[in-house]
Image (cartoon, grey):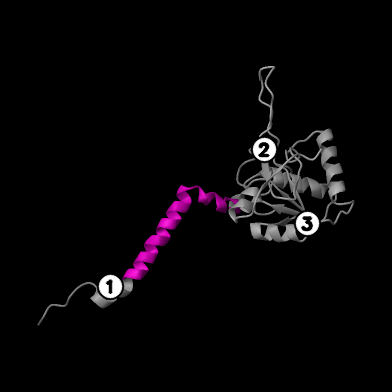
Amino acid sequence: MRPKRMGLSKQRLARALPMMAAFVVIAALVSALYANGGAHAFAGDAVAEPDGYRTDNYRSAVPRTLTGAVSVPMPDAAKSLRDAGAVFIDVYPRAPKPPNLPAATVWREPPHRSIPGAYWLPNVGYGNISEEMAGYFARALERFSAGRKDMPMVFFCLSDCWMSWNAAKRAMAMGYTAVHWFPDGTDGWELIGEPLTNLTPVP
């Protein structure tokens, strides 16, 4: 009696190889995702909304939600909002002038790239802002909305940026009822191949 052969037959092996190759590819993709810091995309699951405004570590993992606002997690959804006429407000902070520059040095701010058609209101997304900055923010929103508290407004910055979260929360505290928060910001916008343009701060 011939001993029973162990292992896969040629036919079974031929069928199994594509599945094995697919598993290897998937494992490699997951490994690459984590190696390149992609794991942070899921960090929002564990981030709770603070009771007030975020006042430190502004560039860190953010929640998935902002109570009272509409979270816009996908860049293509944000594009649809822009195309529908929503007001886009960039709150990326202004680059500070380096200290101790020689007297003859001409300071030129680095260019700020943002979503075309957006308004740039720098520094309004800090956790604590001065009365002057709060007034600047309030006047700008009133102008952008033409006095309508129900005007859809989308606040953004970069990805993992608490400043856009703070600014959207602050707008709701001012009575605006159609506040949207776009946590992917310009990073997500550029990721789907949409163009960016240079913006200057709103006076």
Q: Is residue 25 magenta?
A: yes
Dot 1 falls on a residue whose secondary structure is helix
Between disc 1 and disc 2, the foreground one is: 2
Picture quarter containing residue 138? top right
- Quadrant that contains the C terminus: top right
At 67% across and 38% down in the image, what residue appears? Answer: 111
Q: Is 171 situated left or right of 56 in this image?
A: right
At 81% across and 36% down in the image, what residue appears? Answer: 133
Q: Which span is picked out in magenta?
A: 17-45
At 82% across and 47% down in the image, what residue appears? Answer: 173
Looking at the image, the residue that sits furthest to the bottom is 1
Q: Which residue is mark 2?
A: 111
Of residue 156 and residue 40, the one placed in the foreground of this image is 156
Q: Which residue is mark 1?
A: 13
> Where is residue 113 shown, x and y percent of the image?
66, 43
Dot 2 falls on a residue whose secondary structure is loop
Q: Is 9 situated left or right of 113 in this image?
A: left
> Where is residue 177 shown, x and y percent of the image?
82, 55
Q: Amino acid at mark 2?
A: Pro
- What is the C-alpha distance between the residues marked 1 and 2? 58 Å
- What is the C-alpha distance between the residues marked 3 and 1? 57 Å
- The correct choice, above or below, for 170 with respect to 96 in the image is below
> Where is residue 49 shown, x and y percent of the image?
68, 49
At 56% across and 53% down in the image, what residue appears? Answer: 42
Looking at the image, the residue that sits furthest to the top is 103
